[in-house]
């Protein structure tokens, strides 16, 4: 389990490494619940990172330009 700051940095690193990430894949990689991923994405957005979400089965998260 990671602390919040370390987890946010790891999440940011994952988003930079690949175009699209399903929430479940991110949650599995970071060993947290999908709900925690949603909260962390909101935290990154509040810090000014352009994290985009595509809803639906084929959706996921990605880091914008």
Image (cartoon, rainbow, N blue to C red):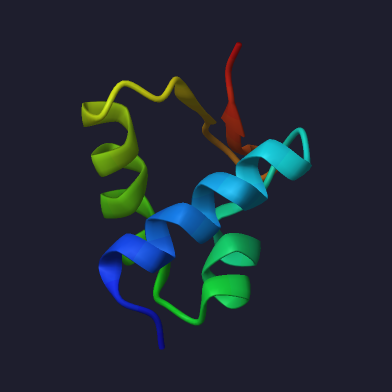
Residue situated furthest right in the rendering: 18
| Placement of 30 over or under 8, stated as above or below | below
The residue sitting at 65% across, 64% down in the picture is 25
* Quadrant of the rendered image containing residue 46: top left
The residue sitting at 39% across, 55% down in the picture is 8
Seen from the viewer's position, the closer of residues 16 and 26 is: 16
| Placement of 10 over or under 64, stated as above or below | below
Q: Which percent across, then down, holds residue 64?
A: 58, 17
Residue situated furthest top in the rendering: 65
Residue situated furthest bottom in the rendering: 1
* Quadrant of the rendered image containing residue 6: bottom left
Q: Which percent across, then down, holds residue 14?
A: 65, 51
- Report the number of numbered marks: 0
Seen from the viewer's position, the closer of residues 34 and 42 is: 42
Q: Which percent across, then down, holds residue 60?
A: 61, 40
The residue sitting at 36% across, 43% down in the picture is 41
Q: Image check: 49 left or right of 25?
A: left
* Quadrant of the rendered image containing residue 43: top left
The residue sitting at 30% across, 61% down in the picture is 5
Tell me the quarter of the image containing the C terminus.
top right
Q: Image check: 40 left or right of 62?
A: left
């Amino acid at each position: 389990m990671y602390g919040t700051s370390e987890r946010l940095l790891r999440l940011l690193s994952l988003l930079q490494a690949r175009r699209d990430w399903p929430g479940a894949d991110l949650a599995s990689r970071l060993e947290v619940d999908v709900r925690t991923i949603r909260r962390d994405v909101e935290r990154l957005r509040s810090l000014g990172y352009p994290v985009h979400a595509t809803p639906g089965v084929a959706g996921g998260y990605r880091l914008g330009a």
